[in-house]
Image (spheres, helix red, strand yellow):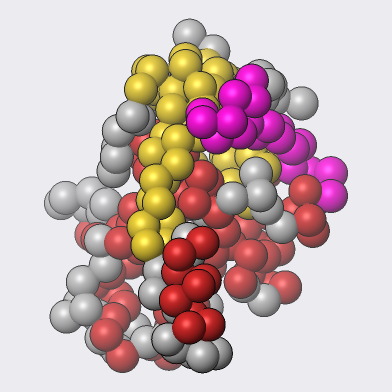
Amino acid sequence: MNDVVQMTGACFDVETQSPSAADALVRWLEFGRREQPRRSAQFRFGPMDLKIQRGALLVLSHSSPLLNHKLFACIDGRERAAAGSVVVNGVVSSAARIRGALSDSSSVSDALMTGLRMPDGDADEAKRRIESAFLFAGMLDLAYVRIKDIAEIDRARIAMTACLLRDADLYLLDEMALLFDASMSEKIHARAQLLAASGKTVVLATSAPEWLRDPSFPAAELNMGFAQNPLRAAARQAAAR
């Protein structure tokens, strides 16, 4: 089967905190110019049909980071679609999932070894992979620092490194990939192109225009509306180029 991801009629529920008309009135009558109370609101994106082929190197574009998060969470197994089907054929490596699983009590070295899924009983292979990971992340000086003591960008660096250096069929890169410096971004590009050339699939979900203009990452726009506002939702088939 050539498709590593198949979505059919998939819908995603997103909860946001937004002020209502009543909240706005309360703001002026009771709170002056202070922040008004906010109420939760739930929206449904979809339905959505999407196919991602093996060997694809692409950007999934949508203006809502919440939708990007939901989409990846359903592909990597953290969440389920509210309706429709999401079928994944192969092993998924997700930067967001790895980042969410980081333990504050672990050292950077331990976190990388856990994220890379080190093989048992092969000390030489484990050493080679951890050395490659530290070179990729540029974090050798933080090897024995606890996760709770490093910056959020360094947590993202660990997750991105582990994600891209794992053995998988599908690699999911979230918007944290946009926060790195030029050196790290170049490494991500090079690694993604190498993986795609070997038949792997690499997908970046983002709304950032600089990645959408990058010719090495063909863009597949997610053009969909809220289910309450019946825009016919569809994501065009994203094929490897």
Taking the image as shown, residue 72 lies to the left or right of residue 186, namely left
- Looking at the rendering, in which quadrant would you find the C terminus? top right
Name above or below for residue 18 compared with residue 198.
below
The image shows residue 124 at horizontal and vertical percentages of: 29, 59
Residue 10 visible (yes or no) = yes
Q: Is residue 172 above or below residue 139?
A: above
Q: Which residues are magenta?
A: 213-235
Which corner quadrant of the image does residue 176 belong to? bottom right
Inspect this view and state whether residue 134 appears.
no
Q: Is residue 234 magenta?
A: yes
Which residue is located at x 45 percent, y 41 percent?
43
Q: Nearer the viewer, residue 88 or 136?
A: 88
Q: Position of residue 119 (x, y in %)?
A: 23, 49
- In the image, taking residue 103 as reference, residue 127 lies left or right, namely right
Residue 227, above or below 43 = above
What residue appears at the point 16 percent right and 80 percent down from the top-left corner?
Answer: 105
